[in-house]
Image: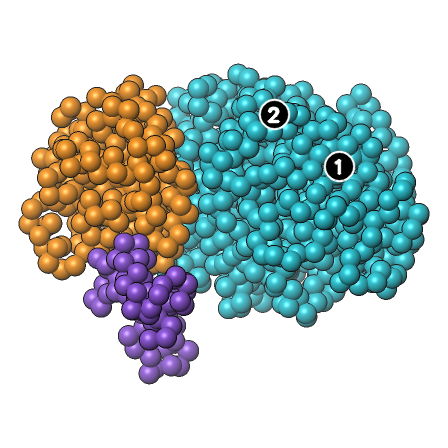
Amino acid sequence: MLVEVFVTPKRGVLDPQGRAIEQSLKSLGFRQARGVRVGKYILLEIEAGSAAEARRTAQAMCERLLANTVIEDYRLRVEGE
Amino acid sequence: MAEIPLGLGGDPDVTPELARDHGLVADEYRLIERWLGRRPTFTELGVFSVMWSEHCSYKSSRRHLRMLPSRGAGVATAPGENAGAVAIGDGYLAVFKLESHNHPSYVEPYQGAATGVGGIIRDVLAMGARPVASLNSLRFGVLDDPRMAYLVRGVVGGIGGYGNCVGVPTVGGEVGFDPAYNKNILVNAFCLGLAREGELASAAARVVDAPVIYAGSATGRDGIHGASLLASAEFGAGSESKRPTVQVGDPFAEKLLIEACLEALQTGAVAALQDMGAAGLASSSSEMAGRAGFGVELDLDRVPLREPGLSPYEIVLSESQERMLLVAYPGRESEVLAVFEKWDVSACVVGRITREARWRTRLAGGLVADIPVRALTTDAPSYERPVKPPAAAGAQSPRPKGAQLTSAQPAAAEQPASTRCELTQFAAGSLEPAQPLSRREVSAPLASRRRRPAPTEALRAMLDSPNIASKRWVYRQYDYLVQSNTVLGPGSDAALLRVKGTKRGLALAVDSNPRACALDPYLGAIATVCEAARNVACVGARPLGITDCLNYGNPERPEIMWQFVRGVEGIRDAALALGIPVVSGNVSFYNETEGQAIPPTPTVAIVGGLDDVGKRVSSFFKSPDDVIAFVKSGTLSLAASEYEALFGLGEEHGNGLKLAQIDPELQKTLLEALTQAADRGLLSSAHDVSSGGLATALAEGCFGCEKLLGAEVTIPEFDGLGPERSLFAEGTSLVVLSYAAARRDEVGQIFAHRGLKLEAIGQVSGVPRLKIGSLIDEDCRALLAIYERALPRRLGEGD
Amino acid sequence: MRWGVVTFPGSLDDRDVLYALREVMGQDAVSLWHKDERLYGAECVVLPGGFSYGDYLRCGALARFAPIMNSVARLAAEGGVVLGICNGFQVLCEARLLPGALTRNRSLSFICERVTLRVENASTPLTRLLSPGELIRLPIKHGEGLYVAPEQELRRIEERGQVLLRYVDADGGLSAQANPNGSMNAIAAVANESFNVFGLMPHPEHAVEACLGGTHGLKLFGSLLQGA
């Protein structure tokens, strides 16, 4: 089952990359840009009987390894959900 | 010969046209058919094309490189090894090499520079040495162009990204900017390794039937033909589209490879070791077998692949990074494989060494290539390219006096026999007096400010010039501390490492001087060698060995070939006069874009030895009231100076484009005097005067301590230049020293004894002000601010 | 006291810590291998700098699952001393043995330079040879050293005195300029609540010999020895 994991810095946590990109966008004339956050996108396949099972497994992966929940949030998209 | 290699189903037909597309000229293709007695398979054609490329075969340069003096006391390697080695005492060898990664870095700066660092580290590792330090020489275009700023950020980021993660400190280097490199930057990477005497690894597979082991990352499609196509042809508008051939580096994989290879060597089961660099498996396996006069048979089914379905052509030519080829003693391969397993580095046997000197590869049991090893290695084509000085006749630039030149000729006993006959081959074309190039090819002044600036204004402009300004923005991104050996790091005349377990130090300097080489490729090359040697001597070390990276344009153009030959002659004459062997090197041709060649840029790195690292001398003033003096060993001029680049030359300046003269013999005397003064502990500081002249050197001397110092000196007048120009004149002959007043006589005697005059011009002051006669009176804090802000202002704060 | 220095794949300063302890300080120090669970009697374990597992995913994220980390966590729980330097600090945060996390430098680039640090708490096993407010010079070299913690947590660690060192200017003052990586509250080193697990971004092992640029690192290693 195809699972997509989006990891982003928690709101309020300093994101120097996001800030730099926002500044660059503004200097390019995209004054509309705000709230730029830079995160990670992880694509993986999980062997599971159902989408719900795949989600549970992916959640456990995020809690243990894929995200550092002290500073990062994560969001999942599971195939077939 | 029952079995004939067969092409595979999907292979294109091999035709002379296809060969031409592979960069092989018609004669070369005919030669291939003659070697094989048949038409080559597609895989064979690919292998010939890379092995016979300029990059792998040195076909234009080979015959000229033989004139370099590669032997000497302490040299532990023969030419042709992966890197050179010299003895440094206490049973240790310094193993080092300098190599270019210009084209890949222009196409993709981060990965190009990163893989350049990775490649040179593996060359040193292949000698069985632990890589202990990196340097690099970078030449960029002008920073006003956003694309150039992007290249600088990318190259510096890549060097740091790779070096920092692989655990080899980047302890120094040089960075220069000139419009002549706007479309062709130079990235030359140097690595130093340390080995015990008698423990050097060999790159020659001298054992028949020995298993060939592939270790490291799996093979992918990256970098196929990187060597042959990128580094062996000019750049054109389409170069951007060559991006897919650029390799991606994985420094983490390299770190594990280093540890695993060094540990594998300790087992005693490894007979030979070689990096899989340019032209990958094809070149590494054929060279290892070729050095021993043997052959090799590879089973391509066993090569670890990153993706399925690679053709034999792709497998043998892939330039995937972080791979080494090892040859184990028969029956001992499991010992080697166990070490790689411990480090989680994949390794497996992929072939064996054969008595018959042929390079054979099989896929699914079928033969896909069968080539005499000689045809790929020692007997690859070599060209005697036409050599012609540039047409523009004009003022002749000076050469060293006749007596100096003859004294610099190779002593027959020191030279391999081949050198002497080689000398006569190109003598006719190359010993013509050097001619200056047209001004167009020399860097155009950065600004067309022809007005003669006030000295203070000139000094401020110098310190603000990216060529002279502090390179902290660059080296702050490099880990120069890891391995705990760095006594003097970036920002010194030469970097200095201590050798653990001994009292010894190793000094490292890398230099190039393209402006001088553009004026006179011969004198410029001499100046480059002398400058690197002087930098090493300024910290108190005795030069032990040279490695060079010769960056030039298209060798098929006789004028470029002339520059190249003159450059090699200059290095030869300087090396002989100074008594320093050239133990390794690299040639980078085709540094041209749209027909515009870079100025000739031979880059020279020198490794020097210091018996007692405690006797080192750094370049900054140390104590108020110390005497400031200079020692001069040649003429100075404004030609090829930063002053000329910034302000041009006044019409009344009769010296024109003449390069300052150099007397290599006198240079040698200077080196000896410097090292002796250091050894006796007489010096507080020693600083080589280079870009920006005496005024700049004095300012830099004040910047070093945590508490800023000042200097108060009178104005010396050099070579009829007048006081103002003397402050900024350059030449390869001036060193600024400081020492305690009580040492005045002792220091003076060391120089006087050798016919060198030490001239005291003032003293260090505790007040941070630089006073030079009545011409300059500036607050050092203001000068330092200019010096430190110049690069961040142009490249981004980094904060 | 016996020291243990862990080597993860990609550790770089492990040899430098061993050199500082053995050759400079004459200590008994063993090298510990990441795949091994044994500590060989080490009472103080150092997690060194480097790029463990290539620092892929996040710095220190993969190293925390190495077999040796089970023993390190056990040692910490039993009150043994654990010191994480640079990448080791990152590993300890990922393993939740220390509060907070380390993210990319404000400048987004790697920074290698000597910095001035102010001692904030001098009554811990790592800092007892120093005095409060004392300034020391140590090198930093990292790309991800910006210390962050959720606000409440940050307040708690400040109140409990878990902040040991702060980046300051030459006169000991706080300023944005003196904070090289943009760390919250200019934090350079922290301890856990029971003051037996320590993490610092600066490298004390690169400040143990005068000829290599200073000896202030000796005071930190020496402090740990005094308690033993």
Please, is residue A35 above or below residue B526 in the view?
below
Residue at image coords 53%, 61%: B151
User: Are discs 2 and 1 less than 8 Å apart at CB?
Assistant: no
Q: Residue flagged by tag 1: what amino acid is it?
A: Val
Give the percent coordinates (x, y) of residue A16.
31, 63
Label 1 Cα crowd, 10 Å radius (few <14 / some 14-19 / many 20+): many
Query: SS for tag 1?
Result: strand
In the picture provided, is B631 more to the left or to the right than B405? left
* Display colour for chain B: cyan
Please, is residue A47 above or below residue B713 in the view?
below
Residue at image coords 32%, 47%: C60
* Display colour for chain A: purple
Please, is residue C72 above or below residue B31 in the view?
above
Quarter of the figure with residue B109: bottom right
Can you see residue B34? Answer: yes
Tell which tag, 2 or 1, sits nearer the viewer.
2
Camera-side residue: B580 or B354?
B354
Instruction: Of the two numbered discs 2 and 1 on the same chain, state the one appearing first in sequence.
Output: 1
Residue at image coords 13%, 60%: C151
* Display colour for chain C: orange
Q: How many labels does the image show?
A: 2
